[in-house]
Image (cartoon, rainbow, N blue to C red):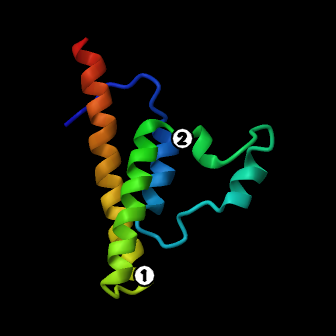
Amino acid sequence: MKVFNPEFNSAEFDIIKSKAGLNNFRLSAKEWRDANPELKGNIRDYATINQLICLSNMESLNAIFINEGLPQAERLRRLNAIAIQQMSVLEGYETNRNFLK
């Protein structure tokens, strides 16, 4: 499937994509604040609705995986794959919905 998005930053996406699946692909709250000193509040205050939906799902799934006794490395691998798939679906839905208007 191809999606037309004139604001898509393919160079930045290539960097993100190259880090997908790595356990070190995360930004702590402190790192986010250091990178965005002009923004006040929590990182979630600046997330899109799609990012918040995905984050909520990841938190629920992580609790299930912890309850099942999955080791952290396996949880991170699964959560990362699921998050990528969910964001693709959510972003695709928004693009398709806007295109159909």
- Quarter holding residue 6: top left
Looking at the rendered structure, the secondary structure element under dot 1 is helix
Q: Position of residue 91 (x, y in %)?
A: 34, 36
**Quadrant of image for the N terminus:** top left
Left or right: residue 94 versus residue 16 is left
What residue is shown at x 26% (from left), y 17% (from top)?
A: 99
Name the residue type under label 1. Ala
Residue 35, above or below 58 = above
Left or right: residue 99 versus residue 21 is left
Residue 74, above or below 51 = below
Crowd class of label 2 (few under 14; some 14 to 19; many from 20; radius 10 Å): few
What residue is shown at x 73% (from left), y 60% (from top)?
A: 30
- Quarter holding residue 58: bottom left
- Quarter holding residue 55: bottom left
Crowd class of label 1 (few under 14; some 14 to 19; many from 20; radius 10 Å): few
Q: Which mark is residue 47?
A: 2
What residue is shown at x 80% (from left), y 37% (from top)?
A: 38
**Quadrant of image for the C terminus:** top left
Mark 1 = which residue?
73
Q: Position of residue 98 (x, y in %)?
A: 30, 19
